[in-house]
């Protein structure tokens, strides 16, 4: 009985050691990801992040009130049509002329976001023809699977990458088994040259093979503010 008991204890110790080793490995991957974000190029970051993703990867970020599409870096072209109501009215490649009377070529914020249910009227060019579409804002899930995440990262402009929030002040990363939690303060200069800082908390989940299956941003403060009619603007 002593031998069997000792064997059982050793087996438990081996499993426990393996669990801690996996946690340390997962923690190291996330630390390396933040390091390359902080100091690397856009190609280095997207290559690092893309190599971590499992085939069933899923990203969840805070929800928002809007139309359910993504705009290209030029601020005028529809890059991705993801969800309703946009999926029923817009197409990838549409060129936006104005939104609720605000010209896309101006420096003003386009009112895609705003109060839930508010009407948004978009004048656009599609295949050389000018047209007008109207729809109402809805709650949007800000999610990505592996394919859409890789595609989205492939559209990142190196010039915009240079303007990203840098100088991350990373707290000690917490890892237990396949779950990793990270929190950091980032700093970014606005158009007036003022440093804007803020904390972010993120959760990562790895599978047994060590591939990333989930990433999630754990803050919905902007989404809550949007339901009261507030949204971020340049001014």
Image (cartoon, rainbow, N blue to C red):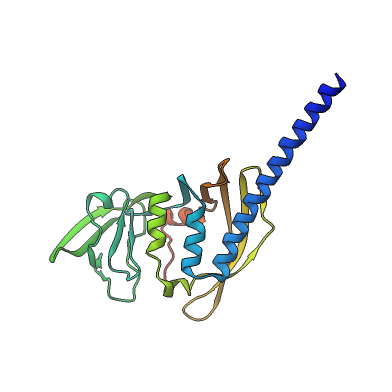
Image x and y of residue 55, in percent: 44, 45
Residue at image x 37%, y 64%?
155
Residue 143 in sight here: no
In front of the other: 230 or 67 = 67
In front of the other: 175 or 63 = 175
Against 93, residue 227 (above or below) is above
- Residue 3 is left or right of residue 84, and the answer is right
Quarter where residue 229 is shown = bottom left
**Residue found at the far right of this picture:** 2
Quarter where residue 158 is shown = bottom left
Residue at image x 32%, y 51%?
82
Image x and y of residue 134, in percent: 22, 56
Residue 38 in sight here: yes
In front of the other: 25 or 219 = 25
Against 96, residue 201 (above or below) is above
**Residue found at the far top of this picture:** 1
- Residue 20 is left or right of residue 207, and the answer is right
In front of the other: 28 or 108 = 28
Number of disc labels: 0
Against 106, residue 51 (above or below) is above
**Residue found at the far bottom of this picture:** 193
Residue at image x 32%, y 67%?
110
Image x and y of residue 60, in percent: 47, 49
Quarter where residue 157 is shown = bottom left
Against 190, residue 150 (above or below) is above
Image x and y of residue 71, in percent: 33, 63
Which corner quadrant holds the N terminus?
A: top right
Which corner quadrant holds the C terminus?
A: bottom left
**Residue found at the far front of this picture:** 3
């Amino acid at each position: 009985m002593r031998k069997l008991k000792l064997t059982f204890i050793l087996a438990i110790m081996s499993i426990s050691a393996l669990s801690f080793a996996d946690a340390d490995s997962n923690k190291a991957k996330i630390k390396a990801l933040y390091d390359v974000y902080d100091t690397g190029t856009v190609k280095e970051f997207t290559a690092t992040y893309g190599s971590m993703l499992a085939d069933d990867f899923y990203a969840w970020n805070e929800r928002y009130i809007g139309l359910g599409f993504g705009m290209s870096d030029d601020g005028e072209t529809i890059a991705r049509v993801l969800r309703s109501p946009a999926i029923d009215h817009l197409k990838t490649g549409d060129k936006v002329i104005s939104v609720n009377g605000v010209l896309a070529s101006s420096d003003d914020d386009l009112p895609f976001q705003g109060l839930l249910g508010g009407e948004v009227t978009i004048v656009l060019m599609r295949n050389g023809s000018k047209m007008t579409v109207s729809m109402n804002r809805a709650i949007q899930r800000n999610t990505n699977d592996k394919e859409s995440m890789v595609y989205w990262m492939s559209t990142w402009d190196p010039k915009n990458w240079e303007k990203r929030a840098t100088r991350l002040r990373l707290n000690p990363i917490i890892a237990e088994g396949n779950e990793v939690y990270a929190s950091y303060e980032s700093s970014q200069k606005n158009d007036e040259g003022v440093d804007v800082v803020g904390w972010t908390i993120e959760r990562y989940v790895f599978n047994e093979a060590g591939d990333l299956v989930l990433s999630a941003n754990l803050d919905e403060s902007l989404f809550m503010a949007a339901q009261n009619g507030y949204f971020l603007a340049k001014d």
